[in-house]
Image (spheres, rainbow, N blue to C red):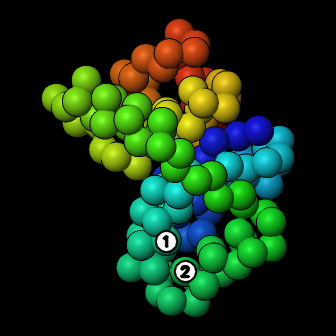
Amino acid sequence: MLIVDAGPLVAAAWTGDRDHRRCVDLLSGAPWPLLVPALVAAEAAYLIGDRLGPAAELAFGQSFANGELVLEPLEPTDLDRVVELMARYVDLPLGMADASVVAAAERLGATTVATLDRRHFSAVRPRHVESLALVPA
């Protein structure tokens, strides 16, 4: 299982991104399932559509329909934790989508997150492990 943040999804979709190849390699070789929290999926869909256009956003949506990516819903307990994390890291600031990644990882016992956002995810201390393993390296 791998929890996926928006950065690797956008980079994998955009061939001109400097992290494109390593994100494609990561996502294509990662242990299944590739879980994308619902708030992250919305963020990535917006960024892909805005930067790459509607055809790219459609392809992103199709990756869920095809089962390549799995949409991880925001559970009611996750929302409580998201708000708690946002308040605790308000000076970072930790946004709602990033906080939902941590909440999902805690609930599912996941220890690894695919992200390009080292600043936020290196600072956050999840409840279930000392720190999250961040990939790609």
Apparent side of residue 31 relative to residue 132 in the rendered image (left or right): right
Do callouts 2 and 1 mark residues in contact (Cβ within 8 Å)?
A: yes
Most distant residue in the front direction? 76
State the mark number for residue 45: 1
Structural crowding at the residue carrying mark 2, measured as other residues with C-alpha within 10 Å and reported as few (<14), some (14–19) or many (≥20): many
Q: Is residue 18 visible?
A: no
Expressed as whole percent of the image width and height from the top left, the position of residue 84 reads: 31, 29
Q: Is residue 28 visible?
A: yes
Depth check: give the residue in front, 127 or 123: 127
- Three-letter amino acid code at the position of disc 1: Ala
Depth check: give the residue in front, 65 or 114: 65
- Three-letter amino acid code at the position of disc 2: Glu
Residue at the image position 62 percent from the left and 74 percent from the top = 60
Measure the C-alpha gap from mark 2 to mark 1: 6 Å
Most distant residue in the top direction? 130
State the mark number for residue 57: 2
